[in-house]
Image: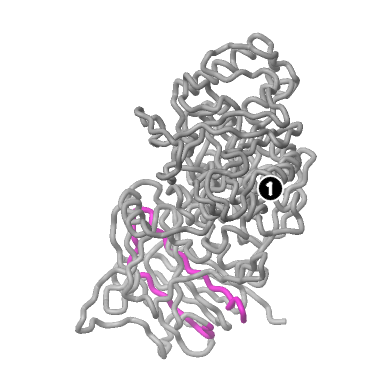
Amino acid sequence: MQVTFISFVIFLVSLMGCKNTLVEPNYSNENTPMSISVDRPGTYTFKNLQNKNIYITLLNTSRSSTAMHKRLWSKNSVDNIVTWEKHGAAAPYSHNNVVASYSQIKSSKTASDDNTPIVEFISKEEFETIYQEENKDVVSTSPRSGIPVATKFNSEPPRERVDDLRAYRKELLEKGRVNKNSVNNNAVSAGIGVNSNIIDLGSSTNVLGKDKKFWVNSDTAPNEAGYTQTESDYYGSTRFKQISATCVALTEHCAIYVAKEQKDLLFSSNTQDVTFPLMEKKAKDLANYFEKIYTMETSLFGKPFRMDLGPSKNEVEILIYDIDADVQSNGGVGFFWGKDYFTNSAQPFSNETEMFYLDSSFVKTDPQVACSTLIHEFQHMINFHQKIILGGMYSVETWYNEMMSMIAEDMIYPIITPNDNAGWVMNVRMENFLRQFRQGSVTHWIDGDVYSYSYLAAFGGYLTRNYGGARFVHELSTNAYQGVSSIANAIETLYPKRYQNSSAIFTDIFLRFPEVMFYTKKNLLKSSFSFEVPVSESYIDYCGSTYALKDFKVWPFTFSNGKTIKPYFLNMNADSNTQYRIRLMSFMVFEHDDLKNVSGDFSITFSELADGGIKYQIYVVSPPDG
């Protein structure tokens, strides 16, 4: 067996811009995969390669607005940042030895003189404007959680309402109505009216078979009868109606209601047979499913507001109705809306209970996705309490909250539903991530954007598999931070000696995110990050529960239906004159036919580096199918 080794010889940087004085690190590689961070202009030389693929990764690590343009590589320009050379067969390397080049990619200008840069860096405001225009006619078939007005409220609720909730909890603590550790000890008495703006924390009023009225919202059903326009436009929406629903399932921790519009139908036509009797049967299955997730999810993430205060009996309410009033399972599958914690006088159209909502069409046609959505929306409910009420914050960034919900799906669904991957979040989201990861962003969320969901599902999966599993997630959910600070603080708490500069923790984490695209069991280094990392028991066992952190590969990723997909990289042969945009906190990968199956010696030159948080990396790995 051939000995594998890596030796690094790094020459000091001389004057930038002069070809003869570029730094020339030399990597003797043979079989070992590697990633190189391009931290200075220069020529990076790889020795003795044996059938390797070489990829160039560009990352935008900026988290604030930036507007800049840089050329990476364009067929008709002599001003490329990146050029490369293949040398002859493997031979002993000598710095003074001139090796003949048989393939040098450095094109000259042509008559067309097309100097369009292949990458454009733009501000987040510019990107969102362009995105909305380019996608205005796109109908997504990928499920989405949340509705914009609810997401906006949950991310930044009215400060005076948040103060009401905190004062309510504080007064209960001072009066000894609930213990200081927020343990569910049945200490809250019925009918305590500490604050008139807060819903009653008394015993449950849910009764199996009993009807109840709920306010529902829709901007997508202009012809739907019964919606009334609000003069105040209170939530940025103009259409609300009150419907009647029946409690069809009642368990220890949840009460599920099914809308009974026109008695047997849910809002619209009967084209998909979404009938009340069918929803009643499905609801009982969902109630049993919720009981299974309750202990697992509250142990990992913490409890929601009312249950944390410990009422004697107070179930989470779940309303099943046609969310988009479209009788289709290709839109909103469910949402949580924090307005419902308050009285109707304090927050118009409040349903005055702790609840979330599920779409009837998804419950019928995609029961696995509906089950996973129970996990997803329950995390949003818990997050509202952990971060807004207990954490002392007045806002939580949407990208962070959505990532946490998809982490919950990833870790809990496979345990409860071990023989059915259809609802597993990676089965639902990885296709969009692997096809269009360059259009995603870690910290820049766009409502309704399927790429935002997909990107955060993948990023959350990368974090949990490589930074501490269940203990890491519990720290994320319960620390007194949110967003970037929560992630950095959780990692610094679990690994206090890993990072010398705590302010750079999140950037370092993001810079290693592209490794999941390259490192597989075939290309795995001991220190590399991957979706295929075998997760130890210490990562998945926590507080008496066992969570899932399934390893999976992306070369290719295999879906529950047997379909496969590989990561989509930008091929510079075909796309050399195409302009691409890169979002904040995102990355893209470039490949070239000339950089595949390389043997012998290889040099790649970066004549200059970008600024504004732009980073380059070189990955040298074995061909995925080789």
Give how far across and how far down residue 535 sits, in percent. Answer: 72, 55
Which of the 4 image quadrants contains residue 494? top right
Q: Number of labelled discs?
A: 1
Give how far across and how far down residue 336 sits, in percent. Answer: 55, 37
**As drawn, is 462 to the left or to the right of 241?**
right
Q: Residue at x 34, y 65 (%)?
A: 119
Towards the viewer: 459 or 309 = 309
Q: Is residue 618 magenta?
A: yes
Q: Residue at x 55, y 76 (%)?
A: 28
**As drawn, is 348 to the left or to the right of 208?**
left
Q: Is residue 33 magenta?
A: no
Vertical comparison of 244 with 516: above or below: above
Dot 1 amino acid type: Leu
Give how far across and how far down residue 370 sits, in percent. Answer: 64, 49
Give how far across and how far down residue 417 sits, in percent. Answer: 74, 53
Vertical comparison of 303 with 76: above or below: above
**As drawn, is 196 to the left or to the right of 423?**
left
The C terminus sits in image quarter: bottom right
Vertical comparison of 622 with 130: above or below: below
Towards the viewer: 461 or 23 = 461
* Stretch of the chain drawn in magenta: 597-626
Which of the 4 image quadrants contains residue 571? bottom left
Provide the residue designation for mark 1. 278
**As drawn, is 126 to the left or to the right of 293?**
left
Would residue 467 be visible to someone looking at this image? no
Q: Residue at x 45, y 32 (%)?
A: 156
Towards the viewer: 6 or 174 = 174
